[in-house]
Image (spheres, rainbow, N blue to C red):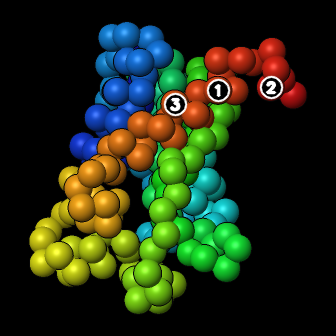
């Protein structure tokens, strides 16, 4: 089974592969960089909108280039405010070859105000975390969740759960029909 994911970030590619392997076995996942159509640091509804835009772009690319893929995965990291508290999470949108759609999210985790202030100014969480840790490209490794959980959880783990839940409407189309 061939799956396209709208990123060349190895964390997103590996998370997609793991989630689809759990459902179907031998998944061939290819990462293609596509535009999200939302700001670099999406906020609230922009997160799922960006994920959907990526999945739609992949579906269209598949049709134009006849790539032979069956599923199209958009993953967008962002922040949202719930009950007065800001959280980081990954939004996922998956389309199948017929255009059926499923949404999911990773677990949410709280971010400190000092980081939120920078994010609301438009700075990407990955850049903030790189500076905080004096490292480079942390978003392609453990991510912010790795730092805040003392490396107990990785960004890949977050995305795997979101991808698994985004598949629910596609696995149970009879319950989610329009």
Q: Which residue sits at x=24%, y=61%? A: 150
Q: Earlier in the sequence, mark 2 or mark 1?
A: 1
Taking 39 as reference, is 168 above or below it?
above
Q: Is residue 127 left or right of residue 102?
A: left
> Front-most of 148 and 160?
148
Q: CA distance from mark 3 to mark 2?
A: 16 Å
Judge left or right: residue 146 versus residue 89. left
Q: Is residue 165 left or right of residue 156?
A: right
Q: Is residue 167 visible in this depiction of the protein?
A: yes
Question: Is any part of residue 53 visible from this angle?
Answer: no
Question: Where 95 sits versus 37, above or below?
Answer: above
Q: Residue at x 47, y 38 (%)?
A: 161
Quarter of the rendering occupied by the N terminus? top left
Q: Are marks 3 and 2 in contact (CB under 8 Å)?
A: no
Whether label 1 touches label 3, CB < 8 Å: no
For marks 3 and 2, the one nearer the N-term is 3
Among the 4 quarters of the image, the one containing residue 97: top right
Q: Which residue is mark 3?
A: 164
Q: Position of residue 174 (x, y in %)?
A: 80, 15
Gap between marks 2 and 1 measured at Cα: 9 Å
Query: What element does badge 1 sit on?
Result: helix
Q: In which quarter of the view is residue 59 placed?
A: top right
Secondary structure found at label 3: helix
In terms of image quadrants, where is residue 98?
top right
Q: Is residue 136 left or right of residue 55?
A: left
For residue 176, the mark is 2
């Amino acid at each position: 089974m061939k799956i396209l994911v709208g990123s060349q970030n190895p964390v997103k590619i590996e998370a997609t592969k793991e989630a689809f392997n759990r459902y179907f076995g031998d998944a061939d996942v290819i990462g293609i960089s596509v535009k999200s159509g939302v700001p670099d640091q999406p906020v609230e509804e922009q997160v799922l909108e960006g994920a959907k835009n990526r999945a739609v772009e992949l579906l269209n690319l598949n049709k134009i280039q006849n790539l032979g893929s069956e599923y199209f995965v958009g993953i967008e990291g962002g922040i949202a405010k719930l009950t007065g508290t800001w959280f980081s999470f990954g939004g996922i949108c998956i389309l199948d070859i017929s255009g059926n759609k499923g949404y999911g999210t990773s677990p949410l985790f709280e971010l400190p105000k000092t980081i939120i202030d920078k994010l609301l100014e438009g700075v990407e969480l990955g850049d903030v975390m790189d500076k905080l840790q004096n490292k480079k490209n942390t978003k392609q490794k453990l991510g912010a969740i790795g730092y805040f959980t003392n490396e107990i959880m990785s960004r890949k783990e977050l995305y795997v759960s979101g991808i698994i839940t985004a598949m629910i409407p596609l696995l149970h189309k009879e319950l989610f029909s329009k």
